[in-house]
Image (cartoon, helix red, strand yellow):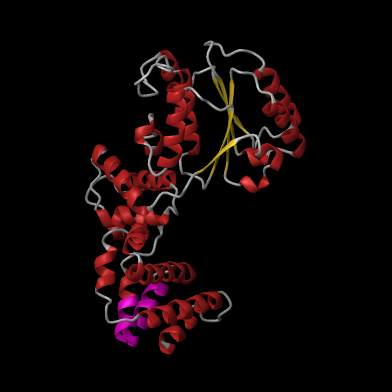
Amino acid sequence: MLYRKYRPQVFSQLVGQEHVVRTLEGALSSGRVGQAYLFTGPRGTGKTTIARIFAKALNCADFGKKGTILPCNTCEACLSVNNGTSLDLIEIDAASNRGIDEIRALKESAQVSAPSGGYKVFLIDEVHMLTKDSFNALLKILEEPPAHVVFILATTEPHKILATVLSRVQRFDFKRITPAEMVTKLKSIAQAEKIQIDDLALLAIAKSSDGALRDAEVALTKIRSMIPSGPIGEKEVADVLGLIPISYHPKLLGFLASGDKASAVALIHTIHDAGMDLEHFTKEFISYARSALLSRVNPTLSASIEGPEAHQQFSALNTIDNEKLIKIINTFTLARSQIKFSPIPQLPLELAVMSL
């Protein structure tokens, strides 16, 4: 799996979470390390990866030395975490260890010093899965943790965590990775692996991953296994992943802008006849039309959503005014809600085209 092979090992390799990295590096350089952290955000955005890098840095041989970059990835403590043999980093999956007995065992383990004599780091993944009694038991040790213990709680659903627990942790909110950031990372992986894939194909992978870099790396792994040789374009990515080619979105918007009803309806039939999900296509088309509208106000924001190439596409739509773009978005939003109830799936989209 490419996501394992290219998992970041130092803070500088991380993508899209600079606000988290700056704070943690500041804590390490100043020596003011907190005893409980909460990493929250969508899946695949680097929560566990950053937790492991932070755990390495805490027990790195260079920790406490001024002017050093942590972790060094050469000392015994760093290498043991990289190899998965560290006794100082205890990873717990709360989804399968959510009971009171497991938390009691954790409390007992926390009282014992770290084998290396440094920090003992407990990484509890999917912490929102703990039972209420387990949270109460965890709360006791979070109130007065031993000086050698650091807790890192990771979750995708922070609203399920007790307020009393939230009040005792430093919270970091991870953001979704933008398509532009993903394309840069995927391109570096493709170059290292000698995968012949163009930028539009990488953008299609990035947009299909909904901000989760891990999902994008898994998708690239799948594509490489299905197409081991030869150039990979947007069509090949769409075929392997079952995606709708992103080139369809500007085509349909262009037909609507010019009033070409025949071509717009023909494109809808092409999508339907190819067995693609019309509701999913409509959702993506609405997102594209929204980006076209945002480009009039904030080009940088729309480029981060659709990719830098989209700005030229949007510029070509200068014949369509904002009011019509808004009408297109509203009309297709209504059509999408009607697709699942329509006796003919493509009918709501056909009517949307006619009404526009």
The spot of residue 46 in percent (x, y) is 46, 39
Q: Please say if 306 is above or below 19.
A: below
Residue 327 visible in the shown view: yes
Residue 276 is one of the magenta-drawn residues: no
Placement of the C terminus among the 4 image quadrants: bottom left
In the rendered structure, which segment of residues is drawn in magenta? Answer: 253-273
Q: Please say if 187 is above or below 80.
A: below
Q: Is residue 219 left or right of residue 230?
A: right
Placement of the N terminus among the 4 image quadrants: top left
Q: Please say if 313 is above or below 327.
A: above
The spot of residue 73 in percent (x, y) is 37, 21
The spot of residue 153 in percent (x, y) is 59, 34
Residue pictured at 26% horizontal, 38% vertical:
193
Residue pictured at 25% horizontal, 72% vertical:
315
Residue 162 visible in the shown view: no
Q: Residue furthest right?
A: 133
Q: Is residue 303 left or right of residue 212?
A: left
Residue pictured at 41% horizontal, 49% vertical:
177
Q: Main secondary structure of the magenta part?
A: helix
Residue 251 falls in image quadrant: bottom left
